[in-house]
């Protein structure tokens, strides 16, 4: 979930600190564990028995992908690239705690400004980061140039944010979340115009072949774990801040009621809470 302010230009359209975003990204890995397992398992199956010595996590965020890739590909070096030093510090701390520090390297850079000097790559994983790039086709071209023949790139993206509320929620005005997402979509049209791109032709244009897509459905009904509730609260808080000036006062107040942890209408008291959406992973191979 999701790249994050300016983290390789990720999530520049939301307000919040690096720490807030890192916490949300960690929750994404925990709450959407089944998605992450399925998506990275699909990438691993595409690698099959080919050698895999060096992996790039492009726009690594708090490192959910970095850590999972290091665990799946024993012996491989995983390079986490991000524009946030705080995010990279979190990855380094996780790697140290898990005994993976010798195989995880971090690089602090803005990929729109400079491509870091890397050795040849076997696999590149870019999760919710490409749509934040000012020049994603240039970045994909750089990935292609750095990838060995028969190496892979996997781009994981979403067309719109996850949904957490049924359509009838709105405190007398049903459709609260739909209106908020519509407002956020109008904001995104200006701030992140690459959101919702079709990545298959862009991977092909960069030179990759055998390009395939797989859509992963996310559907959690009435999750009651503290992690799921905090995840929903984090997403809706960012929705509230990202679309605030496009929301009418009634919808702003309705969101505030849901986000007020001490209120009777708070998310933790709502049995209808859901987590719904899709993420698409597009896979390409260098000829």
Image: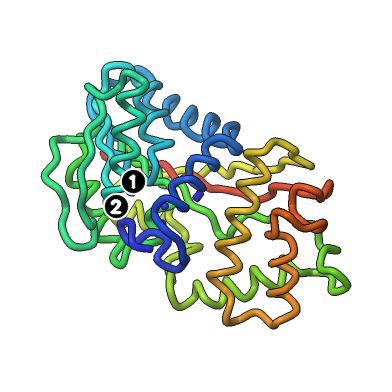
Image point (59%, 56%), residue name: 235
Q: How crowded is mark 2: few (under 14 residues within 10 Å), some or many (20 or more)?
A: many
The residue positioned 26% from the left and 29% from the top of the image is 104
Residue 68 to residue 143: above or below: above
- 183 displayed left or right of 90: right
Q: Is residue 100 left or right of residue 189?
A: left
Q: Choose between 107 and 112: the one closer to the eye.
A: 107
Residue tagged 2: 84
What distance separates the C-alpha of mark 2 from that of mark 1? Answer: 5 Å
Find residue 214 and report its horizontal and vertical position in percent: 54, 42
- Residue 206, x across and y down, in percent: 28, 54
Residue 119 found in image quarter: top left
- Residue 268: image x %, image y %? 75, 47
- Residue projecting furthest to the right: 172
Disc 2 + disc 1, Cβ < 8 Å: yes
Residue drawn 88% across and 72% down?
172
- Check disc 1 and report the residue beneath it: 87
Q: Which of 254 and 263 is in front in this view?
A: 263
- Can the viewer see residue 150? no
């Amino acid at each position: 979930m999701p790249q994050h302010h300016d983290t390789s230009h990720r999530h520049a359209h939301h307000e919040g600190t690096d720490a807030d975003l890192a916490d949300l990204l960690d929750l994404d890995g925990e709450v959407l564990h089944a998605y992450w397992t399925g998506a990275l398992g699909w990438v691993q199956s595409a690698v099959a028995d080919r050698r895999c010595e060096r992996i790039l996590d492009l726009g690594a965020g708090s490192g959910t992908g970095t850590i999972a890739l290091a665990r799946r590909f024993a012996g491989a070096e995983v390079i986490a690239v991000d524009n946030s030093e705080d995010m990279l510090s979190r990855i380094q701390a996780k790697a140290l705690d898990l005994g993976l520090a010798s195989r995880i390297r971090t690089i602090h850079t803005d990929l729109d400004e400079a491509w870091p000097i890397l050795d040849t790559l076997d696999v590149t994983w870019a999760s919710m980061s490409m749509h934040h790039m000012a020049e994603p086709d240039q970045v994909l071209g750089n990935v292609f140039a750095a990838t060995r023949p028969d190496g892979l790139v996997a781009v994981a993206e979403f067309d719109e944010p996850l949904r957490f509320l049924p359509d009838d929620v709105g405190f007398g005005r049903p459709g609260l979340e739909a209106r908020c997402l519509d407002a956020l979509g109008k904001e995104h049209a200006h701030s992140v115009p690459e959101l919702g791109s079709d990545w298959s032709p862009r991977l092909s244009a960069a030179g990759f072949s055998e390009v395939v897509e797989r859509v992963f459905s996310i559907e959690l009904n009435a999750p009651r774990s503290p992690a799921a509730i905090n995840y929903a609260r984090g997403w809706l808080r960012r929705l509230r801040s990202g679309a605030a000036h496009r929301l009418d006062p009634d919808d702003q107040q309705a969101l505030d009621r849901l986000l007020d942890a001490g209120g009777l209408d708070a998310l933790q008291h709502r049995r209808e809470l859901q987590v719904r959406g899709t993420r698409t992973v597009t896979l390409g191979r260098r000829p």
